Image (cartoon, helix red, strand yellow):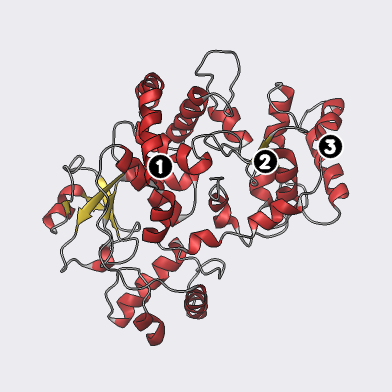
């Protein structure tokens, strides 16, 4: 499966303003924009001849724009989304990969403190263990998205990072391919991430994320560590929650010690809790009637990799499955909203002054927070899961 997937990482930037200090002005004619990017590159100290060679073949890619605007997969609720992504085949192959590359995983855990299930889950979801890495020309995609005025502050720096890789001899602007959003390799890293966190794990003198599992896994782990991953700590664990729990205390905005959650009746469904002193949140992806998890500090690092709540929760859960956790208890949650219902809800919340981001039909973090506040105000169970009762009350 191609990184449906990396694109979610970008959702937080939707609706960005068209100009930013220190960036090339977006929009207008693509050739004019390309000329401005060349001028900026030379101004940053790159040789004119190198810049001309780098940009010589660049073209605007309408397929990239189409992919950027087609992200309906993230409208699916957690149970549906996770069941679609976590197939028996993907689980079986993941365990085989962990066994096959045991020495690589051992080195990864020793050096970076990132558990093997975590990177294996990313490897599975991002590229189906390297099988589908994307066939978009990377420079064309990055330039197209840099020219587009939705998120130039994210993509323009990646163009200049790709230029630096080109100068190092590790990026070909004509032939380098990957996901539509510019990510490269088995775990789909942007050029800037490769520069900052790339690891030549197999010792052949180059960082090759496309064909070297060792390079890809250790580079991904290094990136997570740089993003704040805490070595040797858990990230997500399924729990049982009492029916008299104060639901307004659930969600990622509220943390308490594991010991305090235990006092409130939260218990692990499998195994034992991490350190009693760890701060954690109780997560209800589909409300109080659905699956329940306790999210440790490392869970928040996932959002530095990808901004989609449903993707992050699924990736973190799959990592626990790869390391022996049982299938979650799906419960019997209230029905998920349709696209039309979710947009109606977002419009009503926005009319009440809440920042829900773009009205896109996706139950993201901002919409969840607004739902929970309105549930509290209306005296409804404040589990952040929208229901027909809530929509009617609004």
Q: Earlier in the sequence, mark 2 or mark 3?
A: 3
Q: Residue furthest top?
A: 204
Q: Residues within 10 Å of mark 1 (few under 14, many from 20)?
A: few
Q: Position of residue 16 (x, y in %)?
A: 64, 59
Q: For the point 52% across and 22% down, which residue is it? A: 199
Apparent side of residue 129 relative to residue 86 in the rendered image (left or right): right
Q: Is residue 125 above or below residue 81?
A: above
Q: Secondary structure at mark 3?
A: loop
Q: Which residue is mark 1?
A: 89
Decide if residue 108 is in sight here: no
Q: Is residue 158 above or below residue 168?
A: below
Q: Residues within 10 Å of mark 2 (few under 14, many from 20)?
A: few
Count every numbered label the image shows and give the total. Answer: 3
From the image, which quarter does the C terminus lie in?
Answer: bottom left
Q: Which residue is mark 3?
A: 57
Q: For the point 53% across and 13% down, which residue is it? A: 203
Q: Secondary structure at mark 1?
A: helix
Apparent side of residue 66 relative to residue 328 in the rendered image (left or right): right
- Return the residue nearer the eye: 282 or 87: 87
Q: Residue furthest front?
A: 89
Structural distance between the alpha carbons of marks 2 and 3: 16 Å
Tell me the number on the disc at residue 121. none
Q: Earlier in the sequence, mark 3 or mark 1?
A: 3
Q: Is residue 206 above or below residue 357?
A: above
Q: For the point 86% across and 28% down, which residue is it? A: 48
Residue 392 lies in what quarter of the image? bottom left
Front of the two marks 1 and 2: 1
Tell me the number on the disc at residue 135. 2
Q: Earlier in the sequence, mark 1 or mark 2?
A: 1
Structural distance between the alpha carbons of marks 3 and 1: 40 Å
Decide if residue 125 is in sight here: yes
Q: For the point 40% across and 46% down, which residue is it? A: 315
């Amino acid at each position: 499966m191609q990184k449906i997937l990396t694109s979610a990482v970008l959702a937080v930037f939707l609706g960005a303003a068209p100009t930013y200090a220190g960036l090339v002005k977006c929009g207008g004619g693509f050739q004019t924009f390309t000329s401005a990017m060349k001028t900026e590159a030379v101004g940053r100290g790159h040789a004119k001849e190198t810049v001309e060679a780098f940009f010589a073949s660049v073209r605007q890619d309408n397929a990239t724009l189409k992919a950027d605007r087609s992200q309906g997969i993230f409208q699916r609720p957690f149970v549906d989304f996770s069941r679609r992504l976590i197939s028996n085949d993907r689980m079986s192959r993941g365990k085989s990969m962990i066994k096959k590359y045991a020495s690589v995983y051992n080195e990864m855990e020793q050096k970076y403190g990132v558990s093997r299930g975590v990177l294996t889950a990313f490897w599975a979801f991002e590229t189906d263990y390297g099988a589908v890495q994307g066939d978009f020309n990377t420079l064309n995609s990055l330039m197209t998205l840099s020219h587009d005025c939705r998120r130039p502050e994210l993509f323009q720096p990646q163009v200049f990072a790709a230029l630096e890789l080109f100068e190092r001899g590790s990026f070909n602007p004509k032939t380098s391919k990957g996901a539509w959003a510019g990510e490269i390799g088995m775990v789909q890293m942007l050029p800037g991430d490769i520069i900052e966190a790339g690891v030549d794990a197999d010792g052949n003198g180059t960082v090759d994320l496309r064909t070297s599992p060792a390079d890809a896994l250790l580079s991904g782990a290094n990136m997570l560590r740089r993003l704040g991953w805490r070595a040797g700590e858990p990230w997500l664990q399924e729990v049982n929650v009492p029916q008299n729990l104060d639901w307004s205390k659930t969600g990622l905005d509220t943390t308490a010690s594991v010991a305090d959650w235990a006092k409130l009746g939260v218990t692990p469904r499998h195994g034992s809790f991490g350190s009693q002193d760890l701060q954690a949140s109780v997560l209800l992806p589909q409300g109080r009637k659905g699956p329940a998890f306790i999210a440790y500090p490392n869970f928040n690092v996932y959002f530095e990799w990808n901004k989609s709540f449903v993707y992050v929760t699924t990736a973190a859960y799959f990592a626990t499955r790869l390391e022996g956790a049982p299938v979650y208890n799906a419960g019997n949650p209230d029905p998920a909203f349709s696209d039309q219902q979710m947009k109606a809800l977002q419009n009503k919340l926005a009319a009440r002054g809440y920042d829900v981001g773009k009205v896109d039909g996706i139950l993201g973090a901002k919409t969840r927070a607004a739902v929970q506040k309105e549930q509290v105000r209306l005296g409804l169970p404040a589990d952040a899961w929208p229901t027909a009762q809530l929509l009617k009350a609004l």
